[in-house]
Image: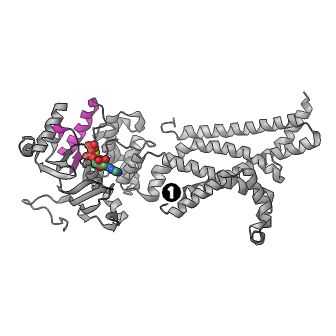
């Protein structure tokens, strides 16, 4: 084993961790807000709104993330009005293109998780709240969301894990995240096995940290779990 | 109809709390209620009896608008509930009114329906604080008093899943009475309980009735209905088939179908 090479490589790859985490974290937050909005649309009383939520989810779940990234990064530059819009300073940057693609993609999955979590809230508990005069936002805030959060958290943690790994695709549009740096090192040294193994281990550690956080949050939120 | 607004005369009847007139409810082609009239006066304890599927739950749920009747008139606490026509049925016209009325009409369900993410005490404090907007400290004292009334003071910090059915139902009763409701609706409050737990819930209800509370109770507990109610209403196929004092009805001979219904139950034990 070439220990000096391995430690040097690990050091260089670790420099990509902040970018990887920034991509995942930002996309997770934006994606969650989008997902909540889409889940709200999916519950709407108006059929066209429900349909548009369905179509949105179907579109982003039905196409590969890599293709979505390419469309946003290469395709948007061809569209005249986007080039002229105030968004262009963002869309011209690979970083924001990656954030956009990841956010849109995760929001489609997140919306489904939120929809399922809300559907899992016991109907009779909602009815009991209505019978006491609760409705609208109060009912959502006090009865539905707290329970949906508990139910959806494990699934959303899973989605966060998938998102973390999906950020590695951002490297194909020149971003120097952990995978991007790994590519560059391989091109320089041709020692792909060692380099990608270390990169994989870094993702494994990050995923483990996320899983532990989600687990702790779950325990905290479980009824009676707060000791 | 005008709501009863004049103060009760010493000789006259107590004011009406709930008045249902010609209430019907249809689910598609199924006519569940076929014109039910009922007037509940303050202080009355009315047991609603009837075979399974006769529309007891549906009727009770119409009274606090968990179901919207297909036609008819409903006056609750002196307010006529405002509906607007929709298709060949009705729709709630004023949700604010319905929420206000619901906060003064307590309901106890067959399956307790406590909020599983909140402790016993939180369950009881939830609506007074967030629906009625009352002061938290004041509510806390009242919630503890309500829990003491149903014998659950020592379980305030438990979650519903940690309680027996009878305990959960008693908490559900505390949750209802802490709102200081003008009338309490019970939909088979003991049907989901193991036989040995039925008594503790009936005892609480018995005490509430003795306090002079207005109660409408859907139940299959014949002995309880006979001993505690001031009036029995017997539903059959969505209509009031017979009503009267328990003495008059249980003596037999007033309505043949009621007698059959009762003897059927007695035989089952
Ligand atoms: N939401 C609904 N949709 C369709 N049919 C319904 C609905 N709710 C009740 N029904 C039907 O209405 C009829 C009366 O139901 P209801 O629950 O009022 O009876 P019940 O007298 O309370 O009976 P039980 O003693 O079994 O509780 C039943 O035939 C039932 O299937
Ligand atoms: Mg019923």
| The quadrant where residue B209 appears | top left
Does the Cβ of the disc 1 residue fall within 8 Å of ligand 1?
no
- Count of numbered badges drawn on the protein: 1
Query: Camera-side residue: A187 or B139?
Result: A187
| The quadrant where residue A209 appears | top right
Ligand 2 lies in quarter: top left
List the single residue furthest toward the right. Answer: A188
| Residue B67 to residue A182: above or below | below
| Residue B154 to residue B20: above or below | above
Query: Camera-side residue: A78 or A163?
Result: A78
**Image-based side of B155 in relation to A184, left or right:** left
**Image-based side of A191 in relation to A101, left or right:** right
| Residue B77 to residue B253: above or below | below
Quarter occupied by the N terminus of chain A: top right
Q: Residues within 10 Å of mark 1 (few under 14, many from 20)?
A: some
Residue B119 on the magenta span: no
Segment colored magenta: B195-224
Visible in this render: residue A216?
A: yes
List the single residue furthest toward the top. Answer: A1
Image location of residue A204, percent across then percent down:
74, 36
Residue B196 on the magenta span: yes
- Residue corresponding to mark 1: A43
Q: What secondary structure do most residues of the magenta stretch adopt?
A: helix
| The quadrant where residue B116 appears | top left
Chain label for disc 1: A
Q: At 26% across and 45% down in the image, what residue appears?
A: B53
Q: At 82% across and 41% down in the image, what residue appears?
A: A14
**Image-based side of A146 in relation to B135, left or right:** right
Image location of residue A223, percent across then percent down:
48, 39
Query: Camera-side residue: B184 or A61?
Result: A61
């Amino acid at each position: 084993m070439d220990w000096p090479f391995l430690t040097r490589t690990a050091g260089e790859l670790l420099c990509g961790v902040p970018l990887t985490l920034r991509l995942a974290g930002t996309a997770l937050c934006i994606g969650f807000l989008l997902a909540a909005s889409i889940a709200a649309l999916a519950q709407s009383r108006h059929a066209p709104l429900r349909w548009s939520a369905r179509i949105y989810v179907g579109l982003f779940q039905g196409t590969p993330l890599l293709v979505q990234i390419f469309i946003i990064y290469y395709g948007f530059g061809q569209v005249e009005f986007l080039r002229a819009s105030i968004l262009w300073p963002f869309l011209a940057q690979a970083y924001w293109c990656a954030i956009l693609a990841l956010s849109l993609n995760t929001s489609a999955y997140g919306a489904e998780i939120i929809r399922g979590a809300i559907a899992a809230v016991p109907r009779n508990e909602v009815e009991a709240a209505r019978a006491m005069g609760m409705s609208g936002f109060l009912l959502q805030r006090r009865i539905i969301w707290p329970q949906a959060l508990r139910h959806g958290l494990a699934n959303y943690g899973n989605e966060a894990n998938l998102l973390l790994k999906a950020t590695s695709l951002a490297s194909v549009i020149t971003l120097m995240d952990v995978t991007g740096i790994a590519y560059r090192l391989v091109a320089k040294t041709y020692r792909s096995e060692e380099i990608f193994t270390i990169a994989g281990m870094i993702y494994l550690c990050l995923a483990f940290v996320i899983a532990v956080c989600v687990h702790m949050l779950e325990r905290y939120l479980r009824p009676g779990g707060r000791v | 109809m005008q709501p009863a607004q004049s103060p009760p005369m010493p000789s006259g009847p107590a004011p009406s709390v709930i008045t249902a007139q010609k209430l019907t409810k249809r689910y598609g082609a199924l006519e569940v209620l076929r014109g039910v009239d009922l007037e509940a006066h303050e202080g009355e304890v009315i047991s609603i009896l009837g075979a399974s599927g006769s529309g007891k739950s549906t009727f009770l749920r119409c009274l606090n608008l968990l179901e919207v009747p297909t036609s008819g008139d409903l006056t609750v606490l002196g307010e006529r509930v405002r509906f607007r026509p929709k298709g060949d049925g009705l729709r709630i016209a004023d949700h604010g009114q319905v929420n206000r009325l619901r906060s003064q009409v307590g309901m106890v369900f067959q399956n307790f329906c406590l909020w599983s993410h909140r402790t016993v005490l939180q369950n009881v404090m939830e609506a007074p604080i967030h629906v009625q907007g009352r002061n938290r400290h004041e509510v806390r004292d009242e919630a503890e008093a309500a829990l003491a009334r149903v014998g659950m003071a020592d379980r305030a910090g438990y979650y519903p899943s940690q309680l027996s059915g009878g305990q959960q139902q008693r908490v559900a009763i505390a949750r209802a009475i802490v709102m200081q409701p003008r009338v309490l609706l019970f939909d088979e409050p003991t049907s989901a309980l193991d036989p040995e737990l039925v008594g503790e819930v009936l005892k609480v209800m018995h005490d509430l009735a003795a306090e002079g509370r207005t109660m409408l109770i859907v139940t299959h507990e014949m002995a309880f209905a006979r001993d505690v109610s001031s009036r029995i209403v017997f539903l059959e196929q969505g209509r009031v088939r017979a009503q009267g004092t328990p003495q008059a009805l249980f003596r037999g001979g007033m309505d043949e179908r009621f007698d059959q219904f009762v003897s059927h139950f007695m035989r089952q034990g």
